[in-house]
Image: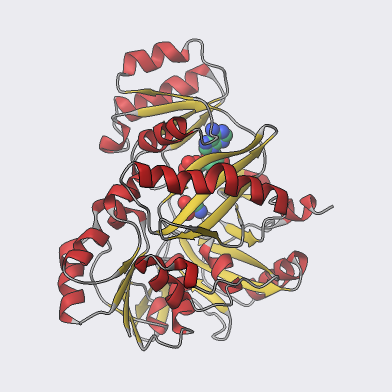
């Protein structure tokens, strides 16, 4: 079977490496992929948002199955377009991807169907938002409605900060049309858990839970990033909490989407906060998380391609989905300065026989050069979380490139939970 994976980051590399283990997969194309992915798939220079060219390529190459991994093409309707030209896909159609594409949609969905989430108000008028902030409880959370490269959420510690955030989104349009509407919501506290799930719209099968580390610096300091590392499973997410989430969040969400005529098929990502009043949804994503995928898929023991086919066909009940009971840790190595300005173009020297997922790198002849903020993720699997973390940091020491930066405390908070 000829497979095409749309996207070009560490998440896509992890998906591709797992698909390569599947017995029925003979050839994998990555659109556009990257210099590191080129080791495992044929990279085609077509951007992930160029839906017309993606469809033309898929038809010309007689692709048997497509995996659309990033949020933008999903929200833009890549799956709809590929299905129209006869290509089966893993991923939701645009009318279901809106669960990530619009925070106003997802918040209203949760309210309508009684799914636990932070209290909130929606504003399309800046002066009303600003006057609401005169008396809103502080800290408060301001969210741009649409996609904003993971940067559309501001936790405001003061009224002034909150007002500035609203102005930057609604007046200065820092996120373009994504800020036409804003959500202002209650600030919640508690450990965060990412739960990725397979769903075909009939059943939902959660994957092993994980924990992201979004801030740039150790001890959760510094700016928000796309994710500096992950561990799985997340020790805060006990069996009891998992059962509660299935009953109060996962199944109700799938049913709600069906009732709205927006059946979701693909990977539905639940970003949860375990508050004193129980688990609540912080966000939904319509796709695999990055870098969550880099710890979740290495623990998958079943055939990913078969699961993806069953998901797309609506036959998930017949899929074998088994995760190992080991632990995994992924340490992201970035260019120093990320998520702001950084230098790149440095040669990467890394071991060939390790689980290293490349995100920001390009080939220059035989050489692999850094070409992005997050350069790569080093994943190791161990019998315990402690062993996985130690092994990851051992491997990190063997990876060399100029201007390298990484957090030294990935998994530390998770280890505390176990004590
Ligand atoms: P998001 O882009 O929606 O994942 O939000 C980014 C991060 O902001 C989340 O991972 C949380 O750490 C934080 N966050 C979002 N919403 C809230 C909230 N209502 N209360 C506290 N923290 C939040
Ligand atoms: N790691 C968070 C995300 O993929 O959105």
Location of residue 389 (image quadrant): bottom right
- Give the residue at x 18% y 69%: 55
Q: Quadrant of the N terminus?
A: bottom left
- Give the residue at x 37% y 82%: 41
> Observer-nearest residue: 38 or 207?
207
Location of residue 183 (image quadrant): top left
Does the image show residue 222?
no
| Left or right: 204 in relation to 37 | right
- Give the residue at x 58% y 81%: 354
> Observer-nearest residue: 301 or 131?
301
| Left or right: 29 in relation to 291 | left
Does the image show residue 169?
yes
Could you tell me residue 219's position as x and y percent? 68, 46
> Observer-nearest residue: 349 or 385?
385
Could you tell me residue 342's position as x and y percent? 44, 56
Could you tell me residue 196's position as x and y percent? 52, 57
Residue 308, placed above or below residue 192: below
Name the colour scheme.
secondary structure
| Left or right: 298 in relation to 123 | right
Residue 61, placed above or below residue 375: below
Could you tell me residue 350's position as x and y percent? 55, 80
Judged from this view, the residue extending furthest toward the right is: 419
């Amino acid at each position: 079977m000829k497979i095409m994976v749309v996207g070009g980051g560490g998440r896509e590399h992890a998906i591709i490496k797992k698909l390569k283990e599947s017995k029925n997969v003979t050839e994998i194309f990555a659109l556009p992929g990257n210099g590191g992915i080129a080791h495992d798939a044929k990279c085609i220079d077509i951007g992930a948002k160029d839906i017309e060219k993606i469809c033309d390529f898929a038809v010309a190459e007689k692709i048997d199955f497509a995996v659309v991994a990033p949020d933008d093409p999903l929200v833009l309707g890549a799956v709809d377009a590929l299905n129209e030209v006869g290509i089966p896909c893993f991923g939701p159609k645009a009318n279901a991807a809106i669960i990530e594409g619009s925070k106003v949609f997802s918040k209203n969905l949760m309210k309508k169907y009684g799914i636990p989430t932070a209290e909130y108000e929606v504003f399309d008028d800046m002066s009303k938002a600003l006057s609401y902030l005169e008396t809103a409880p502080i800290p408060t959370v301001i969210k741009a409605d649409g996609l904003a490269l993971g940067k559309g959420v501001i936790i405001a510690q003061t009224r002034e900060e909150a007002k500035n955030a609203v102005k930057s989104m609604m007046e200065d349009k820092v996120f373009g049309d994504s800020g036409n509407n804003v959500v202002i919501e209650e600030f919640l506290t508690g450990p965060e858990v990412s739960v990725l799930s397979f769903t075909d719209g009939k059943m939902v099968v959660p994957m092993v839970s994980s924990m992201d580390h979004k801030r740039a610096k150790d001890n959760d300091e510094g700016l928000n990033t796309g994710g500096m590392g992950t561990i799985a499973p997340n020790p805060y997410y006990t069996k009891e909490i998992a059962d509660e989430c299935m009953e109060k969040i996962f199944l109700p969400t799938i049913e709600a989407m069906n009732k709205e005529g927006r059946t979701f098929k693909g990977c539905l990502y639940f970003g949860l906060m375990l508050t004193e009043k129980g688990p609540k949804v912080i966000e939904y994503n319509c796709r695999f998380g990055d870098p969550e995928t880099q710890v979740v898929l290495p623990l998958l023991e079943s055939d990913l391609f078969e699961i993806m086919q069953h998901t797309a066909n609506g036959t998930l009940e017949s899929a074998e989905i088994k995760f190992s009971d080991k632990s995994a840790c992924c340490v992201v190595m970035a260019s120093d300065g990320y998520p702001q300005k950084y230098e790149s173009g440095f040669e990467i020297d890394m071991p060939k026989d390790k689980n290293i997922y490349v995100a920001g790198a390009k080939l220059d002849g035989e050489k692999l050069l850094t070409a992005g903020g997050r350069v790569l993720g080093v994943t190791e699997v161990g019998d315990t979380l402690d062993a996985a973390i130690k092994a990851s940091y051992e491997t990190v020491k063997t990876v060399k490139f100029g201007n390298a930066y990484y957090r030294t405390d990935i998994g530390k908070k998770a280890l505390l939970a176990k004590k």
